[in-house]
Image (cartoon, helix red, strand yellow):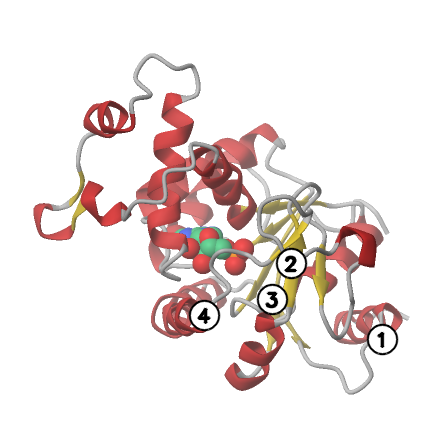
């Protein structure tokens, strides 16, 4: 079934259960996953390595139109001259928004997405977590037109806010490989599970707090839903899959994905 799709967009609220459905798509159709959230977490990790836990709002002044200049940030962090200084600044900016459950501004997100998408040849990709705003959706449509590739379908993972909050609070992630676990539904191996935050592999995402999650759900309703409407107006077909299954198992997830796609 490889080569059947050029690109598929996977959308859904944060914590709706996109990853297991993405796994089915990459496995079945030979696609590769591109996640803007993972890109941001990579840069965020660079900033985190500095160990600077001070309040990031000192770098940001919304009324004045955003962050102080990159050079000022580098100076304040004492990193001017380092090879990875630009990545650290990007990580600081990403963390400022990600930890509050807010979307990273379109200008930053579009530029990072474009570079990653182009490096993958603009085809054979499952787009995870992008686009999330109307501006990003417009940017993507024009990018694929210029690259002469298709957006074959949207897979929308549907889930209720209450179920998402319950599910997300149990989510744990391996900080070495990014594998996602759940304390109840998919417990991580015990030997990798410690209570300390610094030494263990299995950690809670820094943005998996109730406040941040509620902010992300609000961002979805106000910004991502209109982006989805825009893509549907463009005529891109949609597959709606349930994010909550009565009996959860990898086989059941695959069956539900295949069912909506009409695959036997
Ligand atoms: P995710 O792993 O997809 O839940 O993304 C984690 C966080 O990264 C989000 O809550 C946002 O702060 C940020 N993020 C990821 N993708 C985007 C996007 N397309 N636009 C803006 N912010 C994003």
Q: Tell me if residue 193 comes above or below residue 176 in the rendering.
A: below
Disc 2 marks which residue? 195
> Which callout, 4 or 2, points to the residue nearer the camera?
2
Upstream in sequence: badge 4 or badge 3 = 4
Which element is circle 1 on? helix
Quarter-of-image position of residue 193? bottom right
Q: Nearer the viewer, residue 188 or 127?
A: 188
Q: Nearer the viewer, residue 160 or 136?
A: 160
Q: Are marks 1 and 3 in contact (CB under 8 Å)?
A: no
Quarter-of-image position of residue 117? top right
Upstream in sequence: badge 2 or badge 1 = 2
Q: Tell me if residue 136 comes above or below residue 258 in the rendering.
A: above
**Any part of residue 194 in sight:** yes
Q: Are marks 2 and 1 in contact (CB under 8 Å)?
A: no
Upstream in sequence: badge 3 or badge 2 = 2
Disc 1 marks which residue? 252
Upstream in sequence: badge 4 or badge 1 = 4
């Amino acid at each position: 079934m490889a080569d059947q799709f050029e690109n598929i967009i996977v959308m859904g609220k944060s914590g709706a259960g996109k990853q297991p459905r993405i796994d089915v798509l990459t496995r079945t159709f030979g696609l590769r996953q591109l996640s803007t959230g993972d890109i941001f977490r990579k840069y965020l990790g660079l900033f985190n390595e500095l160990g600077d836990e001070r309040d990031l709002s000192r770098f940001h002044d919304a009324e004045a139109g955003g962050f102080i200049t990159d050079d000022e940030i580098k100076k304040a962090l004492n990193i001017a001259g380092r090879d990875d200084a630009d990545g650290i600044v990007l990580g600081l900016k990403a963390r400022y928004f990600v930890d509050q459950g807010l979307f990273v501004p379109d200008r930053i997100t579009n530029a990072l997405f474009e570079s990653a998408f182009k490096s993958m040849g603009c085809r054979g990709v499952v787009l995870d977590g992008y686009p999330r705003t109307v501006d990003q959706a417009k940017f993507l449509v024009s990018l694929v037109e210029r690259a002469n590739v298709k957006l074959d379908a949207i897979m929308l993972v549907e889930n209720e806010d209450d179920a998402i909050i319950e599910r997300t609070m149990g989510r744990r992630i391996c900080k070495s490989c990014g594998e996602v676990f759940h304390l109840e539904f998919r417990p991580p191996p015990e030997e990798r599970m410690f209570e300390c935050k610094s030494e263990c592999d299995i950690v809670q995402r820094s943005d998996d707090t109730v406040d941040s999650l509620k902010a992300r759900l609000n961002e979805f309703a106000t910004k991502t839903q209109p982006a989805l409407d825009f893509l549907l107006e463009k005529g891109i077909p949609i597959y709606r899959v349930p994010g909550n299954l009565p009996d959860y198992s990898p086989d059941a997830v695959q069956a539900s994905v295949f069912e909506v796609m009409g695959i036997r």
